[in-house]
């Protein structure tokens, strides 16, 4: 347990803790892999588990159903899940940046 509690050994934890500091407390966070567990546990935010929304149309429908809620995704999740293109088509805007860590607001392009 000790090795994964060290941020140097656990980029998922670093991402979750930074998301907790950067996203509004009432936000939904797109998550995959460990993030689906880390987001509710370490950030007290509501996750959208991307495992169930691999299809772009299903993902967009879920995001539409969440409107007008605040929805965010970390840059790390965008890259790991290959989501960037799908979310750019939906609507993606930078929200926060700290070195290599980034957070994006997800909302339908106007």
Image (spheres, rainbow, N blue to C red):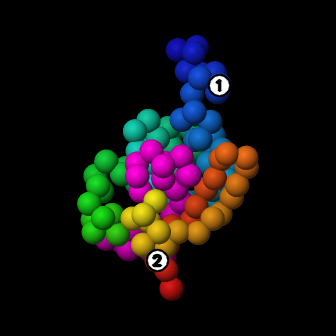
Q: Residue at x 65, y 63 (%)?
A: 95
Where is residue 18? Give x, y as percent.
Answer: 66, 44
Q: Is residue 102 magenta?
A: no
Q: Quadrant of residue 9?
A: top right
Residue 24 higher or lower than 64, as above or below:
above
Q: Judge by depth and name the residue closer to the eye, 29 or 106.
A: 106
Q: Which mark is residue 75?
A: none
- Across and down, in percent, residue 31 comes to 44, 48
Point out the tag, 2 or 1, that comes first from the N-terminus: 1
Question: In percent of the image, x 63 and y 53: which residue is there?
Answer: 102
Q: Residue at x 41, y 56 (%)?
A: 83
Q: Which residue is drawn at the image coordinates 58% and 41% (left, top)?
A: 16
* Residue ID for mark 1: 8
Is residue 37 in view?
no
Q: Residue furthest top?
A: 2
- Provide residue 19's location: percent of width, then percent of height: 61, 48
Question: Percent position (x, y) of residue 46?
Answer: 47, 52
Dot 2: within a 10 Å radius of its alpha carbon, few (fewer than 14), some, or many (20 or more) residues? some
Label 2 SS = loop
Query: Which residues lie in the magenta part?
Result: 61-83
Q: Give the numbered dot on residue 108.
A: 2
72 in the magenta segment: yes
């Amino acid at each position: 347990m000790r090795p994964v509690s060290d941020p140097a050994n656990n980029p998922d934890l670093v991402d979750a803790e930074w998301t907790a500091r950067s996203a509004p407390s009432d936000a939904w966070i797109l998550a995959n892999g460990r993030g689906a567990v880390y987001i509710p546990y370490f950030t007290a935010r509501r996750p959208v588990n991307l495992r169930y929304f691999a299809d772009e149309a299903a993902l967009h429908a879920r995001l539409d159903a969440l409107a007008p809620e605040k929805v965010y995704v970390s840059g790390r999740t965008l890259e790991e899940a290959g989501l960037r293109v799908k979310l750019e088509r939906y609507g993606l805007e930078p929200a926060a940046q700290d070195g290599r860590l980034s957070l994006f607001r997800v909302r339908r392009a106007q």
